[in-house]
Image (cartoon, rainbow, N blue to C red):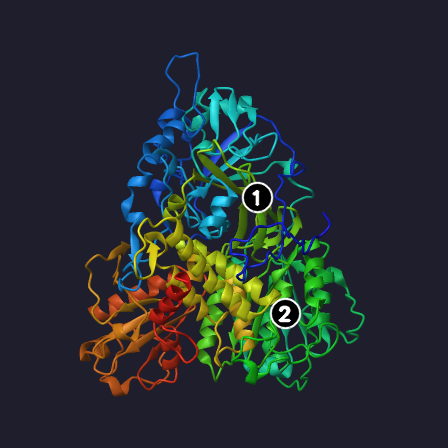
Amino acid sequence: GQAVWSLGHPGLVSWWQPAQLSFGSTLSISAFLSQVEFQFILGMSFLLLATPHPSAPANLKMNRNVGYSYPALPPGYQNTSPPGAPGVQASALQYPDGSKHFHQPPLGTNHLNASMGSLSLQQEGLRPVNLLQERNILPTTLLQAPVPNLHEDIQKLNCNPELFRCTLTNIPQTQALLNKAKLPLGLLLHPFKDLSQLPVVTSSTIVRCRSCRTYINPFVSFLDQRRWKCNLCYRVNDVPEEFMYNPVTRVYGEPHKRPEVQNATIEFMAPSEYMLRPPQPPVYLFVFDVSHNAIETGYLNTVCKTLLDNLDLLPGNTRTKIGFITFDSTIHFYSLQEGLSQPQMLIVSDIEDVFIPMPENLLVNLNENKELIQDLLKSLPQMFTKSLETQSALGPALQAAFKLMSPTGGRISVFQTQLPSVGMGALKSREEPNQRATAKDIHLTPSTDFYKKLALDCSGQQVAVDLFLLSGQYSDLASLGCISRYSAGSVYYYQSYHHKHNPVQVEKLQKELKRYLTRKIGFEAVMRIRCTKGLSIHTFHGNFFVRSTDLLSLPNVNPDAGYAVQMSVEESLTDMQVVSFQSALLYTSSKGERRIRVHTMCLPVVTALSDVYLGADVQAITGLLANMAVDRSVSATLSDARDALVNAVIDSLSAYRSSVLSIQQPGLMAPSSLRLFPLYVLALLKQKAFQTGMNARLDERIFSMCQVKNQPLVYLMLMTHPSLYRVDNLTDEGALNINDRTIPQPPILQLSVEKLSREGAYLMDAGSVMFLWIGKSCGQSFISQVLGVPNYGSIPQNMTHLPELETAESIRTVAFISWLREQRPFFPILYVIKDDSPLKSSFLQNMIEDRTESALSYYEFLLHIQQQVNK
């Protein structure tokens, strides 16, 4: 498939009023359903496995009532009575006993009538909220995704919103209705998320629609025992003979009870027809900056030690390979040939024409050469301590890494500490501190296409590049980040990393690197998203390369990456009561198995504008808009992106006021579902990616934009709108009990200084960082029993750890903070701050509802929105 980069699409209807700024589509895609994907196959053996992944955190218990977890079966399950399946079968999916006439109405007719009639009665969801009068609109617990208005039998089978959710849980029947609502339509995905339970099906028959290639799922309908109707293109397909037998119930003739039709999330072991070549081995190549600047930071000690500690935990099997490259103004390779008494360094000084010396000994089998690898990791940090070489040949080092990895594919992890200065890909500083305050032409675009081109070459050879930037100076992340973005890698940024001057960063790097090295990984992956006929996908967001019109190329896929897509209604969804969306991720596991992970979601179709608003998912909308705003910042300007975000609120609330509200009321009215929309958009405007003012350094801003594009929604929302808790009065009331631990659940407070009391202590969880603010008159017991110091004055200025004391207060506080940290793949540093702490300004900057030097308060923002809505 030839790469298509920017397909203009003048005909796309913007969901903005034409006179106002709208997000242009960066990549327009006609989402026709490719029929050349993979061959449909038939065969006869079947085995059901249900095992939690060993890397899945113990506390990740999936909610059983969404019906997509499958009970783990005992080893000899074929000879036992059938286990109770958690997904309750829909009554219409069960055939009458003994009847020879099979009939099942198309999914929807009797499933939906029960609930469709009550749509108009859901007054609470549609209750207009006057935002200027109702001060306390923030829920005191984390906001949950809205539940689609489907019959409970279908909803039980629906996909978990943590994996797959839509900005609108009521899909407008026409594009005209969608345009009228002025809300974006799109999907947010977390497709490879760690799951504690995942049904895995091994079968030589993977049942798919012969026309559109959709995988059979809970939302297809069975016309009779032998035929099923696709829920995406409506083609009627035959049920293969093997699918007639259910190995769980050991009953023949119940295809509708098979695990594939009872679980919205399922994984298939793919047979050989799904392989273009033998599955690749896990290959890991580490590329280290060893210039004088890099050695000064001390990062190499931490990285080599963490790698040594986790060498046996790298995902893989007996085929796992590993290699190392270091660079300054020259490139150094390391021969780890069997039989050598110590690693041998090979130096290539011609960086204009990079070649690979002795390629067969540079990537070696991890198990067979472990001692040599350990020797190298122990000696590397000391090798360059006397070096005065200040130049950085990052580009040539990456070219060498690409040449070395091309034959196999795999993962390159590159560690860089400065602006690359020599050879291909050398860059010049573009940051001008005086321009930080403006939203004008700051350098958000790459200054060279070298890194993007190299990333596309990598992608073509199934190689992903992850960039760890540990830098105190400007390093042009806008250019360097392309190497990860287009190769489906990730970017990690440790600003001003230094092992002595900034020791708290050392712990962060060590913890995040451990997660990075040991989490599960998928190689040579592709992902395709399909949707019901009439809907089309036109723009993708995330780190990948779009290989064909609707196929994402992911040389590596990891459980911490999120994706988003924008959609439109191409043809009217008349006569449809529900539509479905399906993502399929085909990948090679670290054990060398080809697998397909499938998620399917079903949503109702509506014809009334009020119902579109009723089903709005405000967090998903905010997440999608953030992705669109990053693209807009790069393709146009930062101020354009900020204007478009504000217009998104103005337009949707204007449309609601003029088209849904029967009585015009004074104030600023919003449907209950969108009551947090202005607050979240204001939070986005104050986020590092989009804020104006002198605070944001250019690389920090770019990193924030990278996170918007690559973070699953749950983490993106926390970074955008942090959670604030009072923690000096924690109790066990309403606490969670997890693995014999009691986790307090204090209420979430609004992000305003008016919610702070000098007598209290408050924890702000901003996702990648936490602040514990101690009021000047905070109770003595908290200070001594949690912080372990005698009084307020004794709290150290740079405190970043709480002591684990044997007091009830300490146990509760530490348990709560640890629980928050456990639930994310990155490690938030905890800063304890007082009134005179230098970090107090960072804490206050996150008080979204208060005014800052360059941004409005929440109330001022509402007044501005009201003024525009009432025009």
Q: Is residue 702 left or right of residue 787?
A: right
- Checking the image for residue 536, the label placed there is 1
Q: Residues within 10 Å of mark 1 (few under 14, many from 20)?
A: many
Which of discs 2 and 1 lies nearer the camera? The answer is 1
Residue at the disc numbered 2: 445
In 3D space, how far apart are the residues under numbered discs 2 and 1 (Cα atoms)? 29 Å
Secondary structure type for disc 2: loop
Vertical arrangement, residue 536 with respect to residue 633, above or below? above
Task: Write down the quadrant of residue 83 in the picture.
Answer: top left
Task: Write down the quadrant of residue 248 in the picture.
Answer: top left
**Cβ–Cβ under 8 Å for marks 2 and 1:** no
Between 144 and 649, the residue placed more toward the observer is: 649
Q: Residues within 10 Å of mark 2 (few under 14, many from 20)?
A: some
Specify which label sits upstream in the sequence, 2 or 1: 2
Vertical arrangement, residue 288 with respect to residue 150, above or below? below
Residue under the image location 35 percent in, 63 percent down? 820
> Where residue 328 appears, x then y in whole percent?
68, 78
Secondary structure type for disc 1: strand
Between 52 and 460, the residue placed more toward the observer is: 460
Residue under the image location 42 percent in, 50 percent down? 162
Between 808 and 863, the residue placed more toward the observer is: 863
